[in-house]
Every structure is written in structure tokens, then in C-alpha cells.
Amino acid sequence: MRRVQPKIYFDNASTTALHPEVYETYCNLLKTKFYNSDALYDASVEIQQMIEKSRLAIADTFCVRANEVLFTSGASESNNMAIKGIVFSSQDKKHIITTQIEHSSVYKTCKELEEVFGYDVTYLPVDKDGKVSASSVREALREDTVLVTIMYVNNEVGSIQPIEAIKEIVKKESHAYFHVDGVQALGKIDIDTKNIDCISFSAHKIEGLKGSGILIKKRHVPMIPLICGGQQEFGLRGGTSNALVHILFAKTLRLALDNQKKYHDLIQSHHDYLLNELNQIEGICINSPKDSVINIINFSYPQIPSEVMMNALNSHGVCVSAQSTCASKQGQPSKVLQAMGFERERANSCIRISISYHTTLDECKEFIKILKESCDKYGRV
């Protein structure tokens, strides 16, 4: 079968292209900085110092202490590390609060804790805009609530959760810890880590390397390590450090935050154009709320199932997703859209487009043209 080369990449919420500066620095480091950072000779000490410099820069960015920044292999590990590490360290409390629309690395972790380890998990509902209410968090809190874990920005529809309100409630009205999956928020909206006990991030969503993430864990938070081993990451994550990706996270973060400010208006303009054009196509339903992050637009054309539409777009070199890429091969309707109250047909025909500052107006126009042709060709009469 002939493979079509991508010409329009609208799947940046899934992963991003590597930033040229990150790529160049990584290639240069690979040539000589191969030493184990925990060895005691000078070449290794130099690498360890570079890791700590990166850690300190990240800490300064988020206004936390350097020893509160933990390097991981990505957000899925960070989420697992935070959730399991906290609840296993507090065996006298068995209640967890999360939502029905979390990323699988949070949702399935909570399911495992519920089904295998006997924890009681409350899965809070969301409204038609894909948002959980702060009041529902308050009502769900119990004396034995050990953890509240809620994503900042939903990865499918782009809804922004009321994290500021929620964290105030959790801190003032309970003894629970508060964890936030911040993956889709980083580089898109401003993030204040005050009163957030743990927050997870991933580099490959912001033009960084895959296999690179961080968990910010405030020093008062107890944690049982998932990976026991050596002294790495303050004894909380054993194993030889992936030194170069840790070193590069600071640069990746700086570039992403600079570009967030620099290109906001450009991305907003392309978002508004796409949204306006989509609204003019008969039969299209917009699933993203009006105040979602500007890089994600989720829509449905109920006459065409997601898989058929994605294949049609792919045949023209257009890269999009239907739901979270981690669930792309399950063939099930979007649980996020179903939780938002949409009927099964709409949830089974959703398409997520996610743009970046690399997106051009010409690409947006070409996408709309191809989409209209696909709707006409494959839509049911």
C-alpha cells in the first residue's frame, strides 16, 4: 500500500516536532557526554552538574525548590509516580478523588488502585463544557481522602479545569494532597504551582524529546518510590539517569514558554479561522467549549465515524486524531465526549485537530477544503 507523506500536521496535542535548538544541542551532547552521571571521575561530575543546573532552572521557572523537581521518563510515569507514591505512603486513608475525563495514565491508575488494591475512588462528572465543578470536589471530600488528582487541560477537547478554585478548597477544607496532570497546559496557559502538591509535565508536548518528563513534588509530600534502586532523584526513582534528556528539559521549557507569549496571537488567529469555517459546514458539531485552550479544536461530523474520517484525511496527507492517542486503537467512542453528555454517535465521530505556531493559514484553508470534500464523499445520504 502506498504511504502518503504528511503535508498538514494537526496533531500537536499528541506530540510535537523537535525544536531545532533542542535537536542540535542533543546531537552535540551525544558525541561526548555519554558518561554515567553518578560516577565520581571528573567527566561524570560535569554531567551531574549539568543535570543540576537544568533542575535549578526548572525550579526557578515554577518558583519551587530544586529538590522538588524530579526527572522522569514522561508524564505517564510522573502521574503514576505521584498517585501511587502518595497513596501507598498513607495506608490509613483509602479514598481518592478524580474525574471521568482524565488521561489514561491517571484514570487507569485509579482503576488499578480501586480494583487491585481496594481503594475507594470517586470519579467526578463534568458538565457539557467538559469541566468539573469545584463544588463537586468539596462535596466529595472525606476524612479519609488521601488524594485529589485532576488534569489542568483536557487532552481531547481542550477544556480548562478550575484548578485555582479546586486547590483552594482542597488545601483549606481537607488534609488530602492535590496532584495535577499539567501536560496539555504547559506552554499554552500560565501555571501557578502554589498549593499544588504535585504536578506532571512532558517534554515531547512542547517540542522536546520523547522519554523526558518531570514531576514537581513539594517537599512536604510523602512518597513511596515506584522504582527502587540507587540514589538517583533523591532516592525516589532508581536507575541510571537519562542525563542528556534531563539536561535538555530546561532549554525545552524556556523555548516553549518564550513561544507561548511570542506566538499566542498567531495561534489564536488560526484557531478562530478554523472554528469559523467549521461552524459553516452543515452537520459539523463543535465539541470543544468556547473558552478551551486555543491549540485544540474537537468537532464531530456524526454521519462519518472517526476512523473513516481520519483515513479520508490521511489519504490527503492530513494528520489528526480522534481522541487521546493513547486510546487511538481501542475503537471505542470517546469517553470524554460521553461524559460531557453527547450521544454515542457524536462521541464515535469526533476529530481532534491541534495546531501550533508552525501552522500556517494556507494549511488551515487546505484542511477545510479537504474536510469539505471528505464530508461530501463519505457522508451518509
Image: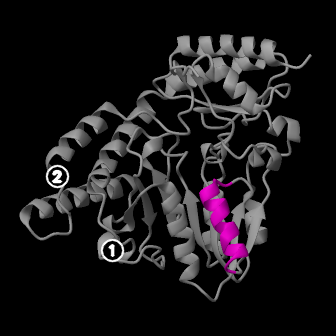
Q: x, y percentage for residue 120?
A: 74, 77
Please say if 60 is above or below 282: below
In the image, which disc is placed on residue 156?
A: none
Q: Earlier in the sequence, mark 2 or mark 1?
A: 2
Residue 194 shows up from this direction = no
Compare residues 28 and 357 and report the one nearer the observer: 28
User: Where is residue 58, by image quadrant?
Assistant: bottom left
Instruction: Please give left or right for residue 31 compared with residue 370 in the image.
Output: left
The residue shown at (44%, 43%) is 204
Which residues lie in the magenta part?
A: 102-117
Local crowd size for mark 2, using a 10 Å CA cut-off: few (<14), some (14–19), many (≥20): some
User: Where is residue 268, by image quadrant?
Assistant: top right
The residue shown at (63%, 53%) is 103
**Helix, strand or loop at mark 2:** loop
The residue shown at (62%, 72%) is 147
Farthest residue to the left: give it: 42
**Helix, strand or loop at mark 1:** helix
Residue position for label 1: 234
Q: x, y percentage for residue 165?
A: 65, 58
Local crowd size for mark 1, using a 10 Å CA cut-off: few (<14), some (14–19), many (≥20): few
Residue 69 in magenta stretch: no
